[in-house]
Image (cartoon, helix red, strand yellow):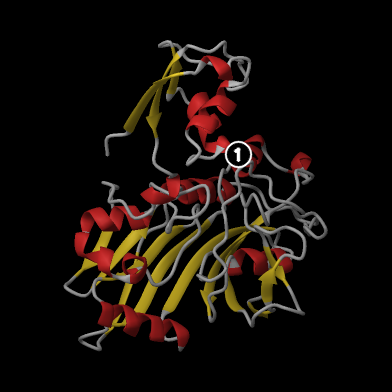
Amino acid sequence: MVPEKKEFKVPIELGGHRIDSVIQSLLPEYSRTRIQKWIKEGYVKVDSLSINPKKKILGGEWIEIQIQPEEQSQQFEPENIPLDIIFEDDHILVINKPSGLVVHPAAGNWSGTLLNGLLHYLPFSKGLPRAGIVHRLDKNTTGLMVIAKDEVSQNHLVRQLQSKKVKREYRAIVWGQVWKNKSISQPIGRHPRARVKMAVNKINGKDSITHYEVLERFGMNSYLRCNLETGRTHQIRVHMQFNESPIVGDPVYGLKKIIPTKSMSPNLKKATLEFDRQALHAIALGLIHPFTHEPMRWEVDLPADMKSLLDIIRKEAIPEKEVFKFDNMYVEDPISEEPEEVDFDFEDDN
């Protein structure tokens, strides 16, 4: 899309005012905040030169503006984003989502999302709600997702999700020595103070059930298999925090920086503290095919970063006497400088 260009001479009577104020008075259809953003990003030239938005002008200057589309207008634009396709037929698409890929456009991520990539790969999906997306993974959670390629399949998959017939299995690397397999049944709702967070909320929360099994237990960490019975926003991450076994690397529901690093080898300390996302992966997905009605199941390997982290953890000696509990050591507020917006009408975000 070629940006629209506007050019004009500043009337002498507007001299002495800030450039952003002048432009806003001449182009009232655009907000001052938006104009300031264009100036800062270099899309506004005064006599062919960039300028500070607070700079006052004399009057008579020549202004050139490259009008930029609103970020929201790009949310349904096709983008050539690589997709790791695990399975595809005429009705469904199963992908292995990488870390860093936002599923659906929202504030702060109006483009570069899975939805944009689907619109490029399947142009006809523009006619489907959310381009055929029926569930979601958090930006930095990896793993399997199913996408519908037609409306009948989409409705069928949504009904399966609602009736808990879709089987979703995760792997998580958590802090602490977890000793027992367990089912966590705690309602999840909005955090009472932090808008972008969820929390165990016994007043306004929705029923949420996570089953987990201990696959391996180490000196400082445990490796878990998690299965969802419900699909609430950030469900596994919130339940693991509630369980006093927060996920390694989780910037929102993870540990504070106060952890017993003196008991950790340099390699383990570096690997865990520098792991830059929640160590959570949707490893398996099972469902009933919407047209053949045959049960189907897919499984993918752990991503390379989690494999590497596990290798380092496995080499750590297990303390003979010490058992580390990570209670009362959680992040109270999001650490991320740009927290991801949560779409509370579209759950299933782990």
Q: Is residue 280 left or right of residue 339?
A: left
Could you tell me which quadrant the N terminus lies in? Answer: top left
Q: Quadrant of residue 62?
A: top left
Query: In this rendering, is residue 273 above or below 165?
Result: above
Q: Is residue 97 left or right of residue 279?
A: left
Residue 208 is situated, as x and y percent measured from the top left of the image, at 62, 79
- Front-lying residue, 5 or 221: 5
Query: In this rendering, is residue 308 above or below 26?
Result: below
Q: Quadrant of residue 63?
A: top left
Give the residue at the far right of this rendering: 328
Residue 278 is situated, as x and y percent measured from the top left of the image, at 57, 53
Residue sitting at x 40%, y 36%: 68
Residue sitting at x 41%, y 60%: 143
Residue 148 is situated, as x and y percent measured from the top left of the image, at 29, 72
Residue 134 seen by the camera: yes
Q: Amino acid at mark 1?
A: Glu
Query: In this rendering, is residue 213 above or below 304?
Result: below
Residue where numbered disc 1 is placed: 274
Q: Is the residue marked by circle 1 packed among few (<14), some (14-19), or many (20+) residues within 10 Å?
A: few
Does dot 1 land on a helix, a strand or a loop? loop
